[in-house]
Image: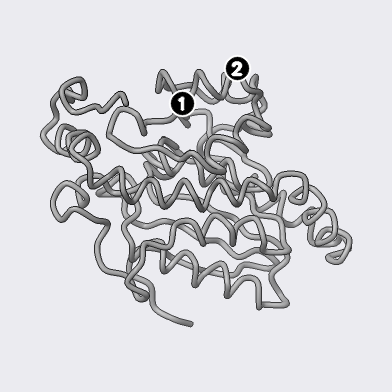
Amino acid sequence: MSNYEDITYVVEDSAAIVTINRPDRYNAFRAKTVDELIKAFRSAWADHQVRSVILTGAGEKAFCTGGDVKQRAETGDYGPSESGMFEIGYLHKLIRDIPKPVIAAVNGVAVGGGHVLHVLCDVSIAADTARFGQAGPKVGSFDAGFGSAYLARVVGEKKAREIWYWCRIYDAQEALAMNLVNKVVPAAELLAEAKSWAAEISDKSPTAIKFLKQSFNADTDHQAGFSNMAMTALDIFVASEEGMEGAAAFAEKRKPDFGSKVNWH
């Protein structure tokens, strides 16, 4: 099995368990992390033993807190990648396209791009200690593709706009009430519960599941175009004064001064 630095990948029975393993950075992803996640999901896709994928985070504090803003503040990007590109858009597409259910086991904070990852998974199981929310407008970032448009399909337009505009944090029970997650369990039982869901689906027809997933996706596949455009816009935005101010303020632990940077025209 290939060695990974930022994640771990194991296959247990019928489930591939993919764990973002950067707890010192609250499981924030850099370009290398995304490359490794893509490799893991592609391995799970090709493995006939694997019938579902569990995505989770290392430790108890965070599932994933999105892009590594400290890295962006230090270097102006998310670090080197195999292709020379930051492949987060492709990872989003891969989570949707893999013809096997993806189960998010949300073990802690899921904010920013980490929140987007769990939303894109087929189902989400949350520890009772999990927290959810968006941070983009606080740190000079956004996801105007699947992260917003698909979220609106999940929780409704009004709630999605609240989540994105106000960047509030919601506890696991609030997430359950808005249909953001499928089930909440005690933190100590989270991975066992996710494995139970994986085992339960393993005796279902894989072809039927594949068609069903593609059918569900077909209703929102048009959002991929917006996602591609949004990723291009984000590349430009993070290099702007306003975008850089958000990253710098986060790294320096101060309130950002967006007012003097914004172009209203």
- Give residue 120's position: percent from left, percent from top: 60, 46
Circle 1 packing at 10 Å, graded few (<14), some (14-19), many (20+), is many
Mark 2 or mark 1: name the one nearer the start of the chain: 2
Quadrant of the snapshot with the C terminus = top left
Residue depicted at x 74% and y 50%: 217
Label disc, if present, on residue 158 of the rendered structure: 2
**The quarter of the displayed image where residue 214 is located:** bottom right
Q: Is residue 255 left or right of residue 11?
A: left
Residue depicted at x 79% and y 61%: 202
Q: Is residue 114 left or right of residue 215?
A: left
Q: Is residue 260 above or below residue 120?
A: above
Q: Is residue 111 above or below residue 78?
A: above
- Give residue 196's position: percent from left, percent from top: 70, 50
Q: Secondary structure at mark 1?
A: helix
Residue depicted at x 53% and y 21%: 161
- Give residue 179's position: percent from left, percent from top: 67, 27
Residue nearest the viewer, comparing 209 with 164: 164
Tell me which amino acid carries mark 2: Lys
Name the residue furthest front: 265
Circle 2 packing at 10 Å, graded few (<14), some (14-19), many (20+), is few
Name the residue furthest left: 252
**The quarter of the displayed image where residue 86 is located:** bottom left
Tell me which amino acid carries mark 1: Trp
Name the residue furthest bottom: 1
Q: Secondary structure at mark 2?
A: helix
- Give residue 192's position: percent from left, percent from top: 61, 48
Q: Is residue 107 left or right of residue 246?
A: right
Label disc, if present, on residue 164 of the rendered structure: 1
